[in-house]
Amino acid sequence: MSESKNDVCYATNPSIHMFMSIKKVALVFVGFYLGFLGLIPMKEAVFDIPMVSLILEQFSDMLSPAQKVLARVANFLMMNRLIFWHLRRRGIKVILFVLNKPENFAEVLGTM
């Protein structure tokens, strides 16, 4: 969801649960890896990201070797259980989407 739509929804009804914008998701990851995630104010209630490993699995034949390496690095950085733990402790629901097979659920539950 875009930042401007989130702001309009929040101004209309401050008690609704909002999803983090792409910009805010990026800020969460940068803040986590630079050590200031605890200082970032968050009014959003849902952290929703894709599982890059599943996207890589589905589209691996269309990606170049460099894109595959980049996707694996992104998956490694995004699937850090400490980020999920921190967000849940702050009362934010963490949702990983594109889970279609039982082994995908097992992979996610192993990281959370």
Image: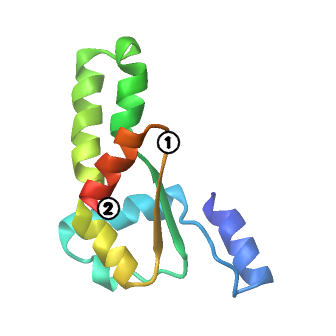
Percent coordinates x, y for residue 50 in the rendering: 45, 46
- For residue 90, what is the image quadrant? bottom left
- For residue 67, what is the image quadrant? top left
Residue at position x 38%, y 64% in the image:
27
Q: Mark 2 sits on what residue?
A: 29
Q: Mark 1 sits on what residue?
A: 98
Q: Where 12 sits versus 66, above or below?
A: below
Percent coordinates x, y for residue 105 in the rendering: 39, 48
Percent coordinates x, y for residue 28 in the rendering: 36, 67
Whole-angstrom CA distance, mark 1 to mark 2, is: 20 Å
- State which tag comes first along the sequence, 1 or 2: 2
- Under mark 1, the amino acid is Val
Label of residue 32 in the image? none
Mark 1 vs 2: CB contact within 8 A:
no
Q: Secondary structure at mark 2?
A: helix
Residue at position x 30%, y 47% in the image:
107
Q: Where 42 sits versus 80, above or below?
A: below
Instruction: Describe residue 1's horizontal placement relative to residue 60 as left or right.
Output: right
Instruction: Describe residue 21's horizontal placement relative to residue 62 as left or right.
Output: right
Q: Can you say which quadrant of the picture contains the C terminus?
A: bottom left
Residue at position x 19%, y 74% in the image:
35
Residue at position x 30%, y 83% in the image:
38
Question: Does the rendering let one see residue 31?
Answer: no
